[in-house]
Amino acid sequence: MPVEPMVFPAHSRPLPHLALFSLTFILTLAGILARPIESLSLFWPVNAVLAGVLLRYPRLANPLGFVLIWMAMVGADLACGSTWPPALWFNLCNLGVIVTIWLLLSRLPRLHRRMRTPHGVLSVFGACAAGAMVAASMACVMAAPWFQESLRATWLAWFSEQFSTSVLVLPALLTAPNTGALLRGSGQAIRLAPMLVLLASLALSIAFGGPGAIAFPIAALLWCAWTYSPFLVSLLALTAGSTLIVAVAQNLMHFSVPQSVPGVTTLMSARLGIAMLVLGPLVVACVSNTNRSLLARLAHQATIDHLTGALTRSAFTRRANALLDSRQQHAQALPLTLMMLDIDHFKTINDRHGHGVGDQVLRQFANALQDQLHDGELFARLGGEEFVVIIPGLEPERAKFTAERMRRAIQDLHLTHNDPRLQITVSIGLDGCTADTPAPSLDELLVRADKALYRAKAHGRNRVEQAEPQRQVV
């Protein structure tokens, strides 16, 4: 009897969970090996990385995924010489951080969870604080056999490390673009000045030293937040924060705090201060990115007609005038042609089929015309069913062939509509100027092309007419 192949449900396929187990094991192993002997880790990014992975890939956030994470952590601890009790219990504390952050942030809308709003940034900070408190409290319950410090010192040590690490690492994972967007890139050069100033301020912090020196990079981080994307700002904040934590731990900054509160050490104080240091820049980066996106949308709406994708009338006027001004500045001016196009009997289409069909006709008409145009040629919707085209470098006489090609393309256009009898035609009037002759103003070109358009309609529509040459006044 043939054995049927094992089929896994979509949510429990083994490969993603195997990758999660391997990632956890490698990160835990690296964290343990980088840990000072007989001490808590200086920087333990494992919990924040795994919380970010589960938030970005929610199909892994199931009981099997959490069990695999814990098993991988325990396995890495045992591989490095730990005994069973501390390996089981302390990695349960680490799992508490991951589960707490995931529970608090997974219920947020995606916009907040990806830190694209100030509310999202504050929510991430709150979730990191809650996860750190859970881990610190669990560690205190289990601390007696393995720690010599007081419960207060143990709680503060766990909380400061988990909170600072989560705040520095998690934003970079939550704001990271998708793989496709990351490979494509923005296509824009990155300004290096804010980044260089940040590196200089970090060097100054270490050279100057003292508790106040951890605030030196704040101005540079705010400049970065105003300039870069939230993802890049998160990476820079991670770099700055981890650099300062290591510098304090190695006593490079001569950082000290008065021991007025039992259990508070220099490193604990520095970690909490550095963690709060990055809150402001991350909020500013979020607000700045939102403002840039809003301005880009407004600029697009002011430039591109939302229905047809053609230029708006105001955008066409600006670009056409700039084109005419540029033409006048050249010693040998190029020819230029302006065409006015009007869909024949468009009001009848709206009255007979409705405005929804009319909008669909306008979109297909615009798409068909744009297929006939080349880069550098202006195409705009003036209003209703009336459009305009400017073709630089083409004389009006030769442009008649181009206009005729456009007319035939519209006449042969197969409209995607239930009524096969629905067909459209276009009337075109054109005017322009030849090489080495002064170009009239845009208003004059539009008036003369409009007169030619009305003559095309008067002569039966679905035709091309050229404006009559101007009479020379002697």
Image: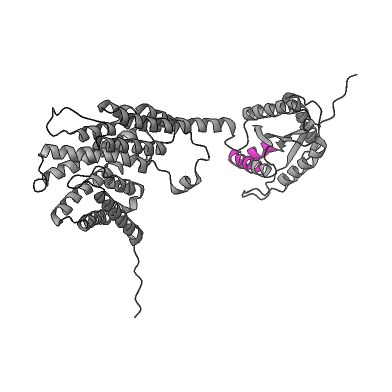
Q: Nearer the viewer, residue 409 or 347?
A: 409
Task: Tell me the chief SS of the magenta region.
Answer: helix
Question: Up-down: is 380 above or below 12?
Answer: above
Quadrant (top left, top right, bottom left, bottom right) of the C terminus: top right
| Residue 108 in sight in this render | no
| Residue located at (22% from left, 58% from top) | 79
| Residue 404 in sight in this render | yes
Q: Nearer the viewer, residue 14 or 421?
A: 14
In the shown orientation, is residue 345 left or right of residue 192? Answer: right
From the top left corner, tell me how far across and down residue 328 is, in percent: 75, 26
From the top left corner, tell me how far across and down residue 106 is, in percent: 31, 44
Q: Is residue 351 magenta?
A: yes
Q: Is residue 338 magenta?
A: no
| Residue located at (71% from left, 28% from top) | 326
Question: Up-down: is 336 above or below 363?
Answer: above
The image quadrant of residue 130 is: top left
Residue found at the very far right of the displayed protein: 474
In the shown orientation, is residue 430 left or right of residue 312? Answer: right
Q: Which residues are magenta?
A: 344-365
Quadrant (top left, top right, bottom left, bottom right) of the N terminus: bottom left
* Count of labels in the image: 0
From the top left corner, tell me how far across and down residue 108 is, in percent: 32, 40
Q: Nearer the viewer, residue 352 or 121?
A: 121
| Residue located at (21% from left, 32% from top) | 269
